[in-house]
Image (cartoon, rainbow, N blue to C red):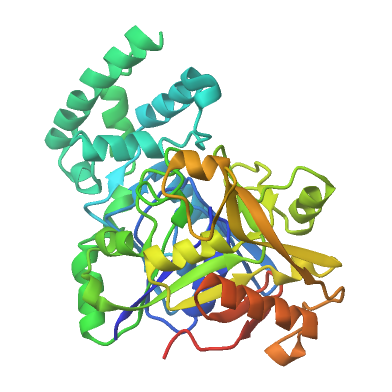
Amino acid sequence: MPALVVVGAQWGDEGKGKTTDILGTRVDYVVKPNGGNNAGHTVVVGGEKYELKLLPAGILSPNVTPVIGNGVVVNLEALFEEIDMLESRGADTSKLRVSADAHLVAPYHQVIDKVTERFLGKRAIGTTGRGIGPTYSDKAGRLGIRVQDLFDESILRQKVEGALRQKNELLVKVYNRRAILTDETVDYFLSFADRLQPYVTDTSRLVNEALDRDELVVMEGGQATMLDVDHGTYPFVTSSNPTAGGACVGAGIGPTRINRVVGIVKAYTTRVGAGPFPTELFDAMGEHLQTKGGEFGVNTGRPRRCGWYDAVVARYAARVNGFTDYVLTKLDVLSELETIPVCVAYDVDGVREDEMPMTQTGFHHAKPIFEHFDGWQSDITGARTFEDLPPNAQAYVEALERLSGCRISVIGVGPDREQSIVRHDLID
């Protein structure tokens, strides 16, 4: 059975967690291949809301084996806080598996993340301060600490000493902070070793063997396409590859294992943090979308910037990910509106651009060109088939499908697991 990848098509917060949770009732493994506890998923099951940051959303489905892949950077303190939260609410986390090759977020990564952002001033990226970027930097610079290092104290100490030799020079001489002690950091990591060990395994082998047995694997991407370090709005991006290709690397499987790539796209657009956002609203309508959509970060509580649907971004995401299907979420948030604008192209310095501008400068200067669609002004949260939607809502969905370059297979009309309209089955 081939694998299925779930990818955010905008700047994150599109509803990937709900989609994975829905799929999780029918699949065997859900793998998180990238990111850390810098991005969260909100999942509503039976009216109960769960906020997941590091754990795959599939952990709420009892038949699923949830996997944290090698491409994830793991904050152990956050991991066990989340496990304890779920267990206190009756969830079973015993099937969780964590890659021995995943890198660990150290306390010094969080310190560096925060002081660097402050040092950048007006050029700050808008990170969560969780230490994700510095951890990925150390991974690329071959100074990282991996999960497996916790079980060999000698190697752990050597690696921490090597990392701190560099970090302390930076902290003390550039940022005027105190030096971080090796013993302090080693003891911090070792305090988690015994509890972590039962979860640790070779997850690449685990997932590949599951696919060999014709079991269904869903890979749940963190963040989103426009935050990809290569394909997003650089430098206002994350530090990993949350596009479909990155899922292969972060899970340890080959691209021939994948046959479905599902993009999650909101019926409007949001982003958190700094960076260009062509359709952003700065008026009462932006506040309406923010309030009606509950657009506040799962991790930080920060209000999300809100704007209209951007079909240029959707087409771009479909191209770089090779989407086979789109899941359109939060259609119900638009139900009170008389008219709904959709960005169909950009005006870049007087020239119409129907596709993503090639340069950062071009995207920064992009002004949206809108088409307007009639609203439906009725409650759609009870709709369970496409025909249940008002004609104008159907027309809006069909227009987005035409403009976005990929079929819309599922439509979200509310936050609960059951509030979804399935037009095409995501699992054949």
Q: Is residue 114 above or below residue 169?
A: below
Position of residue 32 measured from the top left corner of the image (x, y, whole percent): 38, 61
Left or right relative to 191: residue 421:
right
Position of residue 60 measured from the top left corner of the image (x, y, whole percent): 51, 70
Which sits in the foreground, 222 or 278? 278
Position of residue 216 measured from the top left corner of the image (x, y, whole percent): 35, 82
Number of marks in the image?
0
Which sits in the foreground, 96 or 191? 96
Left or right relative to 23: residue 50:
right
Q: Is residue 29 above or below residue 194?
A: below
Question: Residue at position x 38%, y 37% from top?
Answer: 133
Residue 223 in view (yes/no): no
Which sits in the foreground, 297 or 215? 297
Question: Residue at position x 47%, y 18% from top?
Answer: 119
Identify the residue at the far front of this view.
350
Tell me which corner region of the image, top left, top right, bottom left or bottom right, holds residue 75: top left
Q: Is residue 143 above or below residue 376?
A: above
Tell me which corner region of the image, top left, top right, bottom left or bottom right, holds residue 327: bottom right
Tell me which corner region of the image, top left, top right, bottom left or bottom right, holds residue 188: top left
Position of residue 324 measured from the top left corner of the image (x, y, whole percent): 43, 78
Q: Assign the C terminus to one quadrant of the image.
A: bottom left
Which sits in the foreground, 289 or 419? 289
Residue 352 in view (yes/no): yes
Question: Residue at position x 41%, y 49% from top?
Answer: 358
Left or right relative to 90: residue 204:
left
Q: Assign the N terminus to one quadrant of the image.
A: bottom left
